[in-house]
Amino acid sequence: MSISDRLVEAMHLPAESDTVQRIHQSGLAIANVETMSQAIHDVYCGIMADHQEPSEKDRAQAAAMIERLQKYVGEPAQT
């Protein structure tokens, strides 16, 4: 089950809900350490990488990134 599917289920929305699509259209992303580490791997290692899967360094960076994102999500927006 994808993160998006789990979110829809946790929010008790119908399966055909477009909530996740609207979240993405708003410029937001739903991620966990695994999806964030894959994104970091794809961006920084690129398609020419000599390995297919994210490394432990990618996972550590993903965990740190998510931790910082969670910190800022709870703080008031700066204008």
Image: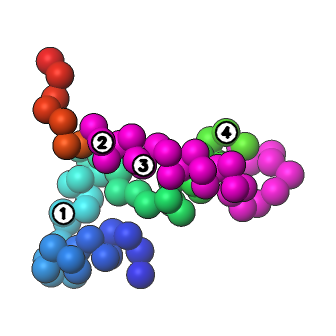
Q: CA distance from mark 3 to mark 1?
A: 21 Å
From the viewer's perspective, tell me whether residue 35 is left or right of residue 27: right
Q: Which residue is mark 1?
A: 19
Span highlighted in magenta in the image: 46-72
Of discs 3 and 1, which sits in the foreground?
Answer: 3
Q: Residue furthest top?
A: 79
* Residue in the picture at 35% in, 42% down: 69
x%, y% of residue 32? 44, 60
The magenta stretch spans residue 33: no
Q: Which label sits on residue 66?
A: 3
Q: Is residue 75 above or below residue 60?
A: above
Mark 2 or mark 3: whose residue is earlier in sequence: 3
Q: How far from the left and from the top, in percent, is residue 13?
A: 14, 77
Q: CA distance from mark 3 to mark 4?
A: 17 Å
Residue 66: x %, y % from top left? 42, 49
What's the CA distance linking mark 1 and mark 2?
23 Å
Quick one: label 1, few (<14), some, or many (20+) residues within 10 Å?
some
Mark 2, residue position? 71
Q: Rate crowding at label 4 as few (under 14), some (14 to 19) or many (20 or more) other CA atoms within 10 Å.
A: few
